[in-house]
Image: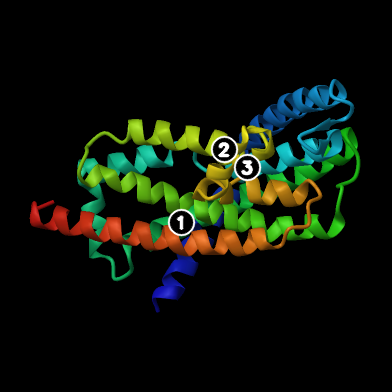
Amino acid sequence: MIVRALVVSATTSARRTLAQPGGVAVTLFFYLAVVAVLSTLWRTAAAANDGLVAGYSAVALTWYVATTEAATVSLDTRLIESTGEDIASGSIAVELLRPASVLAVRVAIEVGRGLPRLGACAAIGVIYSSFVAGPAPGGLALLLAAPSLVLAIACNLVAQHAFAAVSFWVRDARATWFLYQKLVFIVGGMLLPLEVLPDALRQVALVLPFMAMAYAPARLASGHLEPHLLVVQLAWLVGLGALAAVTFARGERRLQVAGG
């Protein structure tokens, strides 16, 4: 019954997104603009370094950028802040009346909202990368990148809710949102491959959950056949889900005790 409610929530959210093509078009325009700029910069860097940057060719870097941006641009970039506002204002208390978990329903809604945008961005990314740089470096690795992208947005959404839960104790989540975004940008591999980072920082980044949100699918799409990345993403999804569930459960109890 609860699973069905979550599926209905995700499906309804996806239909609403598709019913607003203007919003999807804006997302695609922004996505393509960012990919065009970043991929051009990386191809220029590769050309200035004998065709390679940290082991990535110009083609691989283009596919890398197209994938990381698809994994992040398709989601609400201010989700932590907006969720935090709902928590701080007490409006989330109404959702506690539902039989299903507030966290689960909210994540399902965001997954449904993000998947159509992810599919559109991924399609545009494939066309752009193929036209500008050339075919994907590895066919099988690119196939693995598809489920990896879905896992990436799932990890991202669950983690954002875990971060937003701080608003049960601290009213303003803007600082949390700012910190989270910067972590995804750098140690998550959104702006640059982790191999570009200094070795010590790269080793740290590889054991943090943020790599599951951008680096993992991009690494696969850039031609590196490393299926263990999917296992890492699944592990982080479970871990982050447990963290988010615990923080939300404690926050909800605090809200109820406080009379929210």
Mark 2 vs mark 1, CA separation in Å: 38 Å
**Residue at 30% across, 61% down:** 246
Is residue 19 visible in the rendered structure shown here? no
| Residue closer to the observer: 69 or 140 | 140
Q: Position of residue 84 (x, y in %)?
A: 31, 41
Mark 2 vs mark 3, CA separation in Å: 44 Å
**Residue at 15% across, 54% down:** 254
- Inspect the image, locate mark 2, and give the three-letter code of the amino acid beneath it: Ala
2 versus 72 height, above or below = below
Identify the element where label 1 is drawn.
helix
Instruction: Looking at the image, tell me whether mark 3 or mark 1 is earlier in sequence order.
Output: 3
Residue indicated by mark 1: 109
Does residue 165 appear left or right of residue 8 in this picture?
Answer: left
- Inspect the image, locate mark 1, and give the three-letter code of the amino acid beneath it: Ile
Q: Which mark is residue 21?
A: 3
Q: Position of residue 68 (x, y in %)?
A: 66, 41
Instruction: Looking at the image, tell me whether mark 2 or mark 1 is earlier in sequence order.
Output: 1
Identify the element where label 2 is drawn.
helix
| Residue closer to the observer: 174 or 114 | 174
Is residue 226 visible in the rendered structure shown here? yes
Give the crowd class for mark 1: few <14, some 14-19, many >=20 residues within 10 Å: many
Q: Which mark is residue 200?
A: 2
Instruction: Looking at the image, tell me whether mark 2 or mark 3 is earlier in sequence order.
Output: 3
Q: Position of residue 35 (x, y in %)?
A: 72, 31
- Inspect the image, locate mark 3, and give the three-letter code of the amino acid beneath it: Pro
Identify the element where label 3 is drawn.
helix
Q: Position of residue 114 (x, y in %)?
A: 56, 50
